[in-house]
Image (cartoon, rainbow, N blue to C red):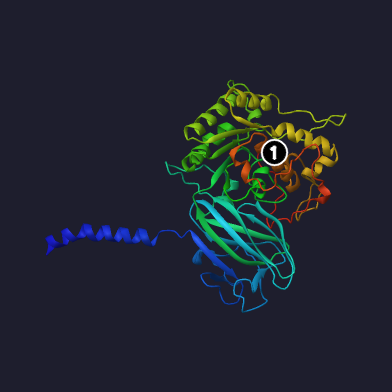
Amino acid sequence: MRARFKILLPFLCSASIAVNAFAQEAQTKFKFDFGSGEAAKGYTKVTPQDTSVATKGYGFDFGSKVTAVTRDAKKSLTGDYITADKPFYFSVNVPEGNYKVTVTLGDIKGESTTTVRAESRRLMLEKAVTGNGDTKKYTFIVNIRKPQISTGGEVKRNAREIGKYDWDDKLTLEFNDSHPCVDAVEVEKVDDQITIFLAGNSTVVDQDEEPWCAWGQMITRFLKPGVAVADHAESGLTLGSFLGSHRLDKVLSVAKPGDYLFIEFGHNDQKEKGPNDGAYKSYTERFKLFINRAREKQMIPVIVTSTARRNFNDSGHTINNLGDYPDAARKVAKDMNVALIDVNAMTTKFYEALGKDNSTKAFVHYPANTFPGQTKALADNTHFNSYGAYEIAKCVMEGIKSNHLGIEKFIIDKTTFDPSHPDTVENFSLPMSGKWSVEKPAGN
């Protein structure tokens, strides 16, 4: 009997492991019907009471207070919807990867205006409007990442990144604007997207708190399904610290041939004062390292020059205070035969077009008491607000088009953007997210 047990034990253990592995396989496809009525066939009903994401794996998150409105109980999917008078969040637990998200918006007996952000305030839909009695479906791609690296170890995150929506186990959507009406949300993992990986600093990162914003979290607004954006930038980083915190290792561990690596550094690199540091020393050599490692992975590297700082002389022209770093990046692009998006030159034109005083409206310049608890004025000439980041994202789109990169075909609006004639700030309007901070991001 004992011998027989020994023979069966390996089989039982193997069977148990197989069953457990199957049971723990994460779900990657969801269909949610928002409201209090009966769920549409094949959909999971989500009501205002569904707030236990940790236990159910989905639900309204971060203290969101929402209301269900029923218009026609016979129309299960579009006859009811969820709304709120403040930004509200819906999350679903998913594994790492790219996800196609389809939202059904509108009110069959009214109008709606909805802005949708994902994760740490990536702009996905800008003021999606439905007319009286209409509903409409919109689809976009959201990248989800985890700090663990498949080849070993994990990304070394700083204190401000802990708890950031970009690094948690959930796909989070923020619904916002004057009258958001959300009928349904569908989420499905997709493996056929070209991914643009972003390596950079605070001018690129997904800033998770108002009024701070960066171009990396705005370019999602201008790209349609077929391409995903994975923003691995972080405030305060240099090419060296991006490497040292294993962020490039993380990118390369999940990238596939044909993906892109956009690289923008310089603001913080210029402060490195070691004997081997400098624009034409460590900065140049590290740029070449990034490019070579990307090419080894059969990725397409793209150099993006640093955004200019707001720095005017008495004649109303901007003064370069990034030293040789923009020129060094241009030289690397030429020497390595890499596409160059010269955001430094474009932002210089952008600031000068606005003028010395009006250009503050593209940056985090706000008088005291603009935000709760803000006792001092904010006057930052490096970091952007939503308007500034939005305009710079348009500059990046121009760079993609002028270089005729393969991802050009996924740009939503092919209209030419001239930074010397930017959108007027008076005509720009985006609702603020629910998170805000007066603390300046790392780096300058």
Residue nearer the viewer, 344 or 135: 135
Q: Position of residue 261 (x, y in %)?
A: 56, 37
Mark 1 sits on what residue? 398
Q: Amino acid at mark 1?
A: Glu
Q: Quadrant of residue 335?
A: top right
Q: In the rendering, at what x and y percent does residue 165 appear?
A: 58, 53
Residue under the point 36% across and 60% down: 22
Circle 1 packing at 10 Å, graded few (<14), some (14-19), many (20+), is: many
Q: Which image quadrant: the N terminus?
A: bottom left
Is 105 placed above or below 339 here?
below
Image location (x, y in percent) of residue 376:
79, 47
- Tag 1 secondary structure: helix
The relative height of residue 273 versus residue 215 in the rendered view (above or below) is above
Near-viewer residue (58 or 347): 347
Pick the quarter of the image with the C terminus: top right
In this rendering, would 262 be left or right of 108? left
Q: Total of numbered circles in the picture?
A: 1
Residue drawn at the location 55% of the way across and 55% of the way down:
100
Residue 399 visible, this angle: yes
Q: Residue at 63% across / 79% down in the picture?
A: 73
Residue 443: tell me if it is visible: no
